[in-house]
Image: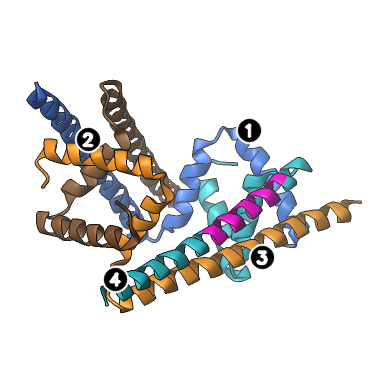
Chain colours: A orange, B cyan, C brown, D blue
């Protein structure tokens, strides 16, 4: 009975560990793509901004850009 | 020529996006395992500690536990 | 002797705790400023972008903006 | 009128920046304390665990420790 409980916990932990492993692998793959991009001259940090912008709805993105421009003008950031 | 460059950037961005998607899926899977564990009475936060401890080399883990016990005693944490 | 060691650790820990407390207070103050800004109609998320942009050297910021515009054009983000 | 709005935004941004500066100073102070602790032989990572444990209510901490021990036994982590 107690052994069953222990096994259940162990199986759950091992499932988490396998998934964490897979996640680690994908994170490495993402890093590799950015590394490849850098190698041909792209800026990884700005690519990340593009990824973030593409996640937004076009209307939201345009509104954000407009407000950002207004704030930049207000602060004298050209 | 410029079009080729644009395509190259687009392809790199799309590869990142697909990988981010996969990563998101795995993160959801991990959350599901913890949710399942909670549903049968386990404490997810403490399970995360176990996952962290199992990543350590046994000797390092034992040394850390010993030092932790010493510090707890020094601070009167029983 | 051992007591002196214990005291030393305790004093170090207590200094960390006081500093963490102060840090928490400042984080709350920052949240309050953003809350105040929201209350008069500003967008806190975009304000945070402004804070980040102002930390950059003007030349670096302009270069980043130029590259960002190029990438946006390449991806058809208007 | 528009100028007043711009000034208001600028003042809010500058308040955030001053607070971020202060926060940075405190974070450096915290790092210094840990550096000092390391210099006399303490383990900074384990000190951080102590800080976390001291934030908990004693009853909660004891309960967490008990569950952690149970899980460690279940997984064969001695």
Residue depicted at 43% across the width and 74% down the height: A32
Circle on res. A42: 4
Residue interval drawn in magenta:
B21-35
Total residue callouts: 4
Select label 1 or label 4 by which is in front: 4
The chain letter under disc 2 is D
Position of the C terminus of chain D by quadrant: bottom right
Which one is nearer the viewer's eye here, D20 or B46?
Answer: D20
* Residue B25 located within the stretch drawn in magenta: yes
Q: In this rendering, would C44 be left or right of D4? A: right
In the foreground, B31 or C77: C77
Residue at the spot 60% in from the left edge and 70% down from the top edge: B57
Q: Is residue A72 above or below residue A55?
A: above
Real-space CA distance between mark 1 and mark 2, rounded to the nearest whole angstrom: 38 Å
Helix, strand or loop status at disc 1: helix
The residue positioned 66% from the left and 46% from the top of the image is: B44
Q: Return the mark for residue D16.
A: 2
Residue behind mark 1: D59
Question: Mark 3 falls on what kind of element?
Answer: helix
Mark 1–mark 3 distance (CA, rounded to whole Å): 34 Å
Which residue carries the number 3 mark?
A: A18
Cα separation, mark 2 vs mark 3, equals 42 Å
């Amino acid at each position: 009975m107690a052994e069953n409980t222990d096994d259940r916990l162990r199986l759950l932990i091992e499932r988490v560990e396998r998934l964490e492993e897979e996640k680690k692998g994908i994170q490495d793959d993402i890093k590799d793509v950015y590394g490849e991009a850098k190698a041909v001259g792209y800026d990884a940090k700005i690519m990340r901004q593009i990824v973030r912008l593409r996640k937004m709805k076009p209307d939201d993105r345009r509104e954000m850009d407009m407000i950002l421009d207004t704030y930049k003008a207000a602060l004298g950031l050209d």
